[in-house]
Image (cartoon, rainbow, N blue to C red):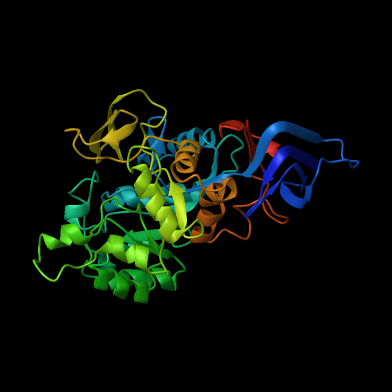
């Protein structure tokens, strides 16, 4: 089946076609050209005054519409993915939380099954982001304390039985056993992140040597000079934050929901890491698209109570953040306003850059021949007007 989509602007990796059109064959982009389409294909839709953009990819997302991936059922996975599709996320990594091993394995089993679900009304599950329980206890944030553990083969071997499903795995580099875990992951082609950590700069440098290549939610649940100074008067040391900015090998991500980080922190991250090494993530929990109130972060039986209030997730005392309640379209708009960066660079941080970080850049993440036609129609305010999955309007 052939179809054509054209718009007043087509957002490419580094530039914009104004106007431009895309020819789609059997769900895959076959041609991208400047100007309005004038050929013989009858199935042609033109969007005057709109942007045609690649679908967004979320590397770090937990839930939405009162479901969490850790609830562990296909229905809950579908609910979360439907919720995020409405915000322009066409592909995602289902992200776990710290939990007991039976809950983790249930999550991974369901994730494996949902990779091939073929939903026409929901974001595609690319695989899992194994996230927790290998966190420093003092940096666990809103994750439950009881399941937090050091990575040992006796603990993680069952998890790695799902190496065909796990795309990325997070670990605090300073934990005993972290090196063995990273090595075991790399042997199975699982990409490793550092996160929820109070590691020193030198410990992060060592982890980069092991093969750690990404850092979870920059600024959040991580060590920096000020935090490390509490345990050592002199000399002052850099932590995970400073190492993330320093090492070119490390990519990272920001939660640009307008609540986690001020505009100046978003601008700093953008200036130092740039759009090719900085991804936008939602870190959204089950309270996304739900009213204010109490919710559970993670599995309803084992997770922690959080609040949705003032457009963000909070701990029950209201004094600490607890994940996000925003969709990716909101993060794109916040990042654009904060940085004033060119639109192709903003879109890249929500599409091609996360695709590269997860290893899907050959098929996803940009408008280019040979890539899946997961596409968005955005108005001039970057609000979503239409969504296409494999070139077909989403249901």
Would you say residue 95 is visible in this rendering?
no
Q: Residue at x 17, y 57 (%)?
A: 227
The residue nearer to you, when weighing 122 against 17, is 17
In the current view of this chain or complex, which residue is farthest to the top?
291
Left or right, 346 with reference to 198: right
Which corner quadrant of the image does residue 13 belong to?
A: bottom right
Which corner quadrant of the image does residue 297 belong to?
A: top left
Q: Is residue 292 above or below residue 86?
A: above
Please identify the quadrant where the C terminus is shown. Answer: top right
Q: Is residue 388 above or below residue 362?
A: above
Q: Position of residue 225 (x, y in %)?
A: 20, 61
Q: How many marks?
A: 0
Q: Position of residue 218 (x, y in %)?
A: 34, 54
Q: Position of residue 123 (x, y in %)?
A: 54, 41
Q: Residue at x 32, y 34 (%)?
A: 312
The residue nearer to you, when weighing 42 against 95, is 42
Q: Residue at x 19, y 68 (%)?
A: 237
Left or right, 71 with reference to 34: left
Left or right, 89 with reference to 50: left
Q: Position of residue 72 (x, y in %)?
A: 39, 42
Please identify the quadrant where the N terminus is shown. Answer: top right
Q: Is residue 152 above or below residue 168?
A: below
In the current view of this chain or complex, which residue is farthest to the right?
40
Would you say residue 234 is visible in this rendering?
yes
């Amino acid at each position: 089946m052939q179809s054509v989509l054209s718009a007043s602007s087509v957002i490419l990796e580094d530039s914009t076609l104004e106007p431009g059109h895309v020819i789609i064959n059997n769900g895959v982009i076959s041609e991208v050209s400047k100007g309005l389409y004038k050929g013989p294909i009858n199935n042609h839709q033109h969007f005057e005054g709109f942007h045609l953009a690649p679908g967004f990819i979320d590397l770090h997302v937990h839930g939405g519409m009162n479901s969490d991936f850790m609830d562990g059922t296909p229905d809950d996975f579908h609910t979360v993915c439907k919720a995020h599709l409405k915000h322009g996320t066409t592909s995602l990594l289902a992200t776990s939380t710290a939990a007991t091993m039976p809950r983790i394995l249930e999550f991974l089993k369901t994730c494996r099954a949902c990779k091939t679900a073929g939903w026409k009304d929901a974001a595609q599950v690319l695989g899992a982001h194994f996230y927790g329980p290998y966190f420093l206890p003092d940096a666990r944030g809103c994750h439950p304390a009881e399941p937090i553990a050091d990575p040992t083969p006796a603990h993680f071997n069952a998890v790695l039985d799902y190496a065909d499903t796990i795309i990325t795995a997070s670990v605090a580099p300073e934990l005993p056993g972290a090196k063995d875990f990273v090595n075991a992951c790399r042997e199975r082609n699982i990409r490793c992140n550092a996160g929820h950590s109070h590691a020193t700069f030198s410990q992060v440098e060592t982890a980069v040597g092991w093969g750690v290549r990404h850092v979870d939610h920059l600024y959040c649940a991580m060590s920096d000079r000020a935090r490390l100074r509490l345990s050592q008067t002199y000399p002052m040391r850099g932590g995970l934050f400073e190492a993330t900015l320093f090492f070119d090998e490390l990519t990272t991500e920001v939660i640009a929901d307008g609540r986690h980080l001020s505009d100046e922190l978003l601008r700093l991250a953008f200036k130092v890491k740039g759009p090719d090494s900085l991804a936008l993530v939602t870190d959204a929990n089950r309270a996304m698209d739900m009213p204010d109130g109490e919710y559970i972060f993670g599995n309803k039986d084992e997770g922690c109570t959080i609040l949705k209030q003032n457009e963000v997730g909070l701990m029950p005392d209201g004094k600490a953040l607890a994940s996000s309640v925003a969709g990716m379209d909101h993060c794109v708009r916040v990042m654009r306003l904060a940085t004033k960066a060119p639109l192709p660079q903003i879109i890249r941080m929500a599409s091609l850059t996360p695709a590269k970080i997860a290893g899907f850049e050959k098929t996803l993440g940009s408008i280019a021949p040979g890539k899946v036609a997961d596409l968005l129609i955005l108005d001039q305010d970057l609000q979503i007007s239409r969504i296409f999955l494999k070139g077909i309007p989403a249901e």
